[in-house]
Image: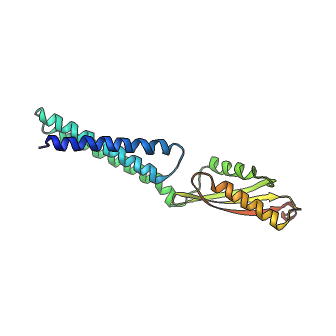
Amino acid sequence: HLDESVLALFCAKFVFKFLFMIFPARKIRGDRSPALRAAFVDARNDCVTTASSVFGWLLALRGMEWADAVLAIPVGLYVGWAGFHLARENLSLLMGEAPPEEVLEALAASAASVPGVLEVRGVRAQHLGPELHAEVTVLVPENCTATEAHDIALAVRRQLEERSGVGEVFVHIDTRAALPHA
């Protein structure tokens, strides 16, 4: 039997988790952080289970003692479904999957915007946990000194590593003279 003090704790927990759920929801929109996504799903699941418990208690007060047990079935299925989808989303990150093509194109466009880059010859990337690691080959003028080419590579690296979700970038520098003739 649930007394009013426990009900008050459940209501306080619901409000706390609801507020906690709102913060990650706003942050998630622009961020692919699996930790933020998991915090959001956890808070959402806690809100659902707490609301179900309170609703079941209220129904039990009205003589429907079985209601709490019956409500537990869809809540359990919902929590299981959410966990399955969360695991499926993160499995690709843990397995080192390559990002979608539009992410690679955005990285190439960002690298191409760095002064001194004539062309982006290739971008490869893969997830290493929650971070994206990338390898970029850029073409610089053939009259660049080694110091200038190094500075361009460093600028490309910094530019790409500032992007959300990008962990480490390796930049390869080529000149037209270094490319094989086709």
Expressed as whole percent of the image width and height from the top left, the position of residue 48 reads 30, 41
Expressed as whole percent of the image width and height from the top left, the position of residue 176 reads 86, 60
Quadrant where the image shows the C terminus: bottom right
Q: Quadrant of residue 70?
A: top left
Expressed as whole percent of the image width and height from the top left, the position of residue 80 reads 33, 49
Q: Nearer the viewer, residue 39 or 119?
A: 39
Q: Residue at x 45, y 50 (%)?
A: 36
Q: Is 169 situated left or right of 47 in this image?
A: right
Q: Quadrant of residue 22?
A: top left
Q: Residue at x 81, y 66 (%)?
A: 147
Expressed as whole percent of the image width and height from the top left, the position of residue 87 reads 42, 54
Q: Residue furthest top?
A: 62
Quadrant where the image shows the N terminus: top left
Q: Is residue 79 visible?
A: yes
Q: Is 10 situated left or right of 139 in this image?
A: left
Q: Nearer the viewer, residue 14 or 89?
A: 14
Q: How is the image coloured?
A: rainbow
Q: Is residue 78 visible?
A: no
139 w.r.t. 52: above or below? below
Q: Nearer the viewer, residue 88 or 155?
A: 155
Q: Is 150 situated left or right of 42 in this image?
A: right
Q: Quadrant of residue 75?
A: top left
Q: Is 58 situated left or right of 44 in this image?
A: left
Number of marks present in the image shown: 0
